[in-house]
Structures are given as structure tokens and as C-alpha cells.
Amino acid sequence: MIPLSVLDLVPVREGGTVAEAMGATTALARAAERAGYARFWVAEHHAMDGIAGGATAVVLAQIGNATGTIRIGSGGIMLPNHTPFQIAEQFGTLAALFPGRVDLGLGRAPGAGPELQRALRKDLHRAAEMFPHDVVELRALLAGDPDTGLRATPGAGADVTLWMLGSSLFGARLAATLGLPYAFASHFAPDHLDGALALYRREFQPSDALDRPHVMAAMTVFCAATDAEAALLATSQQQSFVRLRTGNPGKLPPPLPDYADTLPPPARAMLDHLGQASAIGAPATVRAAIRAFIARTGADEIIISGATFDPEARIRSIALTMDALAKA
């Protein structure tokens, strides 16, 4: 079986608090480690009431302290929001605290309106154009390259594994050029999945970090005792996604029976489209869907996402998923 990992957004549920969300993410990371998952990644988002992972490195420090062996990382850090030097220091600190366990997944989507640009004191669209240069600079800072003119402490010489994240051909080409492992966000942007993976593998240039292409693909996964129970669990995230795409984001809502039946055709089609990178059902259903996705993509690893209103339901989901995939 190829490695399985967990992606978490530190979701804040309706009626809940940020403190509760942090506690739930910590408990999920511990459960992922017990179940045998390879990595636990947290995604950077800002100014969203329902997602509390904005200070990603701080959240990862908490997760690293609460666990002992699972790799921890960003899925990802949106580098245009930062300077390479800041990220070198932050992840160099994590590497010093948790040796041999730190991944740094990098994305370029600024994902921000003018209000957040002002808050971050950044021209995010200009920064996004500088993304390839900034990735190279960050890699040099972590390597302790004297040509950078400045030594990051902590950071220089840190044991941090860089990953390129992407949802389009741009990230695939950059990952191939730099010889980095590539993680594709197929769980929310499946359109370019096949083309991006083909381009990455075709154009890959070996590097000191990696001698051959290495792909991790993301899936939305909800596993429960029955197909019906899993489908109900999934409706919380489905509601959040539809609200986000229609300009009305908020906290994670409770599950809603027959939610898809209440939607207009365009919203229902949007959810159906995302279903090509999802596995929702009882263990046998999830096992078949994940295996089919692996066969389609040739992925070397799978990372699973899927927020539930009840945090315990997600802990059960990741345990059932791992057990299902471990069976012959």
C-alpha cells in the first residue's frame, strides 16, 4: 500500500470556537499517527471565520509537540504572503524542534482581496509573479548557500523537505524544473490533474533532493459504517464549499440530510465534478474508490481531506480508511 497522509484546515464549526478547533486538529493528528498515516499537513488560509490555520507554523509546532513520529508540514504555505527569509526561519525552527519530521509545501495562489493585501502589507499579485524566484531563494536559504548574502538562523542547513503544490500546469512545470516532489490539489481542483501529472513526469529534472518524479494527489474522503452515514457526514463540507464558491463563506455547518437535492443544478454539478477525486462511503466503497484513483493517477502517495462537524467522526473516518486500504 502506498503512503496515506492527512490534510487539515483547522475547521471552526458553527457554535464552536477557535480553541476547540485547535484541540480537534491536535486530536486528529494524534489519531493519524496511531493509525499509521505518513504525514499531517495544515493549509494556510486567512480572514475566514471557518478556517483557523492562518498561523500555519505555530499550528504545526503544536501538532509536532503533541505527536512523536508522524511528519508534519504545510499543505501549503502560500509563499506570496511571506518573504522567503521568514519562511526559512519558521520552518528551520520547526526542523530544530522536530528533527527529520518537517515538510514545507509551497503554493503561489495569493487568494486574497485588497483588504488582506493591505493587512499583509504586500502586493500579492506582484509577489505571485515572483514565486519561482522566491522558491529558489528559499531553497538556497535552507541550504545555507553563502550567495544569498544572509544566513537564516534557524533555517540554514535545516532538514526540511520541500514540496511544490499545485492545481494547474504552472506548479507541475516548476516542480519538474526544480526536481521537487509534487502534490496536486485534486480534491478541490481536479480539472488539470491528468495533464499536470503527465507534464511533471515528462519534464522532471533530477536534483539533489529527488532523483525521480514523486507525486502525491489529494482526495476528499469520508468513511463510515455505511454509505448513507458517510454521505451525510460529507454534507457539512459540501455546504461550506458551495457557500464559499457563491460568496458566502462561514463556519462549518452541521450535516444536512439530502443536501444535494436542495441545490440548484449548477451547484449540484459543481459537487458532482469534485466527486472524481473523492471516496465517500463504507470501508469497501472507500477502498474501491481510492484504489481506482491510484490506478488512474499512478500517485506515489495519497493525502486525504474531509472536514466533519463532529470531530470524532473524522477520527473514526481516517481510522476506517486506513484499515480499509490495509486489507488485501
Image (cartoon, helix red, strand yellow):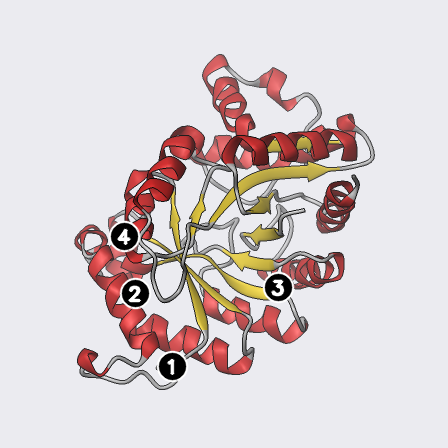
Left or right relative to 59: residue 13: right
Q: In the rendered structure, which disc, 3 or 4, sits on the residue that comes first in sequence?
A: 3
Q: Quadrant of residue 20?
A: bottom right
The answer for how far apart the CA atoms under marks 3 and 2 are is 25 Å
Image location (x, y in percent) of residue 210: 41, 60
At a point 54% along the width and 78% down the height, the residue shown is 99
Image location (x, y in percent) of residue 103: 48, 64
Identify the residue position indicated by label 3 in the image.
Answer: 19
- Dot 3 amino acid type: Ala
Q: Nearer the viewer, residue 107 or 13?
A: 107
The answer for how far apart the CA atoms under marks 2 and 4 are is 23 Å
- Which mark's residue is nearer the viewer, 3 or 4? 4
Mark 3 nearby-residue class (10 Å; few <14, some 14–19, many ≥20): few
Q: In the rendered structure, which disc, 3 or 2, sits on the residue that comes first in sequence?
A: 3
Q: Are marks 2 and 4 in contact (CB under 8 Å)?
A: no
Q: Which mark is residue 157?
A: 1
Q: Compared to 102, does 216 lie above or below?
A: above
Q: Are marks 3 and 4 in contact (CB under 8 Å)?
A: no
- Dot 2 amino acid type: His
The answer for how far apart the CA atoms under marks 1 and 3 are is 34 Å
Identify the residue position indicated by label 2 in the image.
Answer: 82
Disc 1 is placed on an element classified as loop
At a point 67% along the width and 56% down the height, the residue shown is 37
Which residue ends up furthest to the top in the rendered image? 265
- Dot 4 amino acid type: Thr
Q: In the rendered structure, which disc, 4 or 1, sits on the residue that comes first in sequence?
A: 1
- Which mark's residue is nearer the viewer, 4 or 1? 4
- Which mark's residue is nearer the viewer, 3 or 2? 2
Q: Are marks 4 and 1 in contact (CB under 8 Å)?
A: no
Q: Are marks 2 and 1 in contact (CB under 8 Å)?
A: no
